[in-house]
């Protein structure tokens, strides 16, 4: 955890004076972590996903500095080297750096998504961008249908943007009770019926 937080702090420094960018990646990390945990990712994949979420937009600054613009492909071009440099300095494993660097270099590419870390990073980024870019409902709907694959990601999108269409699962009530039972058991509390 310490190293991931250091990466976030480093990114806050990287985008100092730019609260919109800082709030963006912090939100993407939050959604990515939630979806990743809900989807049952193993520890290592979750770690890579969170690290990638922190640095995914690192290419914006070098792209702006070099070309005066920052479209998706320029970000993908400039991001990986910058992410590698930062993560090396913070002592991340080479294997983690390589995968994160790949994700930074592909997070605007929505064809041929392979791996849950890639899929969830894209979903989390979209969840935040739909809101930040004030996108209209129909565009959001089409994009969710086209791109989202995880149940948790789809559910968050539905609840956030189409709450009136959100259909509770038929076992929703039982699921809730089961969760409560599990919670009570884990806390060692006995409730008399
Ligand atoms: Fe982003």
Image (cartoon, grey):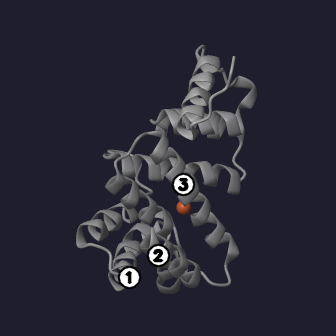
Q: Which mark is residue 110?
A: none
Residue 143 appears in the figure:
no
Q: Which residue is mark 1?
A: 90
Graded by Cα atoms within 10 Å as few (under 14), some (14 to 19) or many (20 or more), the crowding at tag 3 reads many
Q: Quadrant of the N terminus?
A: bottom left
> Going from the N terminus, do you reach mark 2 or mark 3 first?
2
Residue 106: x and y in percent read 37, 59
Whether ligand 1 has any atom under 8 Å from the Cβ at mark 3 is answered as yes
Q: Is residue 72 above or below residue 66?
A: above
Q: Is residue 90 above or below residue 134?
A: below
> Going from the N terminus, do you reach mark 1 or mark 2 first?
2
Q: Which mark is residue 125?
A: 3
Q: Is residue 99 left or right of residue 124?
A: left
Graded by Cα atoms within 10 Å as few (under 14), some (14 to 19) or many (20 or more), the crowding at tag 1 reads some
Name which residue lies at 57% across and 37% down: 188
Element type where label 1 sits in the image? loop
Query: Could you say which quadrant of the image residue 97 lies in?
Result: bottom left
Q: CA distance from mark 1 to mark 2?
A: 7 Å
Q: Are marks 1 and 2 in contact (CB under 8 Å)?
A: yes
């Amino acid at each position: 955890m310490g190293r991931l937080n250091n990466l976030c702090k480093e990114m806050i420094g990287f985008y100092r004076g730019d609260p919109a960018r800082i709030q963006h990646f912090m939100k993407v990390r939050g959604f990515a972590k939630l979806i990743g945990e809900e989807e049952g990712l193993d520890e290592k994949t979750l770690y890579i996903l969170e690290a990638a979420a922190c640095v995914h937009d690192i290419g914006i600054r070098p792209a702006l500095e070099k070309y005066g613009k920052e479209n998706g492909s320029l970000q993908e071009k400039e991001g990986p080297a910058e992410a590698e440099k930062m993560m090396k300095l913070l002592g991340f494993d080479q294997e983690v750096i390589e995968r994160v660097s790949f994700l930074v270099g592909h997070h605007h590419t929505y064809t041929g998504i392979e791996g849950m870390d890639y899929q969830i990073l894209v979903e989390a980024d979209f969840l935040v961008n739909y809101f930040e870019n004030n996108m209209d409902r129909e565009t959001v709907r089409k994009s969710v249908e086209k791109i989202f694959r995880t149940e948790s990601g789809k559910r968050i999108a539905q609840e956030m943007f189409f709450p009136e269409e959100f259909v509770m699962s038929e076992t929703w009530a039982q699921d809730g009770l089961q969760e409560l039972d599990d919670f009570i058991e884990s806390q060692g509390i006995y409730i008399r019926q």
